[in-house]
Amino acid sequence: MLIAVPEVLSSEQLAEVRRLVEAGDWQDGKATAGQQSELAKRNLQLASCCPNAAAAGEIILGALSANGLFMSAALPDRVFPPLFNRYDAGPGHKFDAHVDNAIRYLPDRSGRIRTDLSATLFLSDPEDYEGGELIVQDTYGEHAAKLSAGDLILYPATSLHRVEPVTKGSRVASFFWIQSMVRDDAQRALLLEMDAAIRTLAAKAGDTDPSIVSLTGTYHNLLRRWADC
């Protein structure tokens, strides 16, 4: 299930995140790559110890927790601290096809998370660069994402995906992983559809309508059955 989440960052939040990121300490992206990704990854990344990255990440985490669509789609248990990458046209930066690591250790070594979902939050507008599409493969084929700055794409971390070469300008984004309370993608998709339907019906009939109360109870009983927390 691929979900586009629009306007995760407000214009003010986006401007501040961009300011922090542009002034950050950039390094070769291979420094944080896994064994498979190291061979495929050609980009720049903010150092995990960079204070600007930490400050920008806190803004993003706060925005995520306030976004209803993200919370409903991801049902997050834990979110990996946001990282930041940049793809420049000059060196021909790209990221060949790969699958993200199943387990990620937290930067402070305080624990680890299971990567159920991957997320890319675009910080550059599409007209700022050429190429650089995120390509995600699933059973229905390949899907390209190149969203507006401040928008996010959410997809299963089990997906084979890549970033196309940037041929002009620079593509800057934040990326991170989510351990969901519901690890199964199909179950999360059903819960998201049900939540959306309940909200639509409630807007017409009211939250206290008996059918809405019943459906809401069913939603929470399914979540209770499937949640791993």
Image (cartoon, helix red, strand yellow):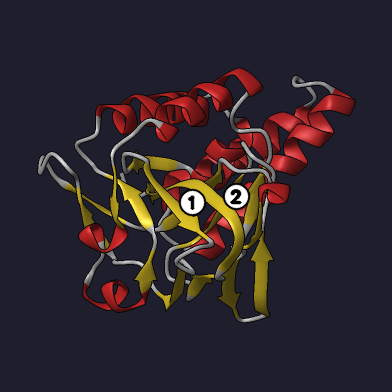
Does residue 156 sit above or below 56 in this rendering?
A: below
For residue 142, what is the image quadrant? Answer: bottom right
Residue 1 visible in the shown view: no
- Residue at x 45%, y 51% (from the top left corner): 86
Q: Position of residue 215 (x, y in %)?
A: 69, 39
Q: Nearer the viewer, residue 93 or 116?
A: 93
Residue with the most extreme right position: 204
Residue 63, above or below 169: above
In the rendered view, would you say 8 is above or below 119?
above
Quadrant in the picture for the C terminus: top left
Q: Secondary structure at mark 2?
A: helix
Marking on residue 192 = none
- Left or right for 209, reference 41: right
For badge 1, the amino acid type reads Ala
- C-alpha span from label 1 to label 2: 19 Å
**Residue 27 shown left or right of residue 63 in the figure:** left
The answer to whether residue 147 is seen in the rendering is: yes
Three-letter amino acid code at disc 2?
Answer: Leu
Q: Where is residue 37 drawn, in percent x and y? A: 31, 72
Q: Residue at x 36, y 67 (%)?
A: 100
- Nearer the observer, disc 1 or disc 2? 1
The first of marks 1 and 2 along the sequence is 1
Rendered residue at 60%/43% (across/down): 124
Front residue of 207/18: it is: 18
Classify the position of the N terminus by image quarter. Answer: bottom right
**Label of residue 119 in the image:** 1
The one of 114 and 105 positioned closer to us in this rendering? 105
For this orientation, the residue located farthest to the left is: 109
Q: Position of residue 30 (x, y in %)?
A: 26, 64
Q: Residues within 10 Å of mark 2 (few under 14, many from 20)?
A: many
Residue 40 rendering spot, x and y as whole percentages = 36, 76
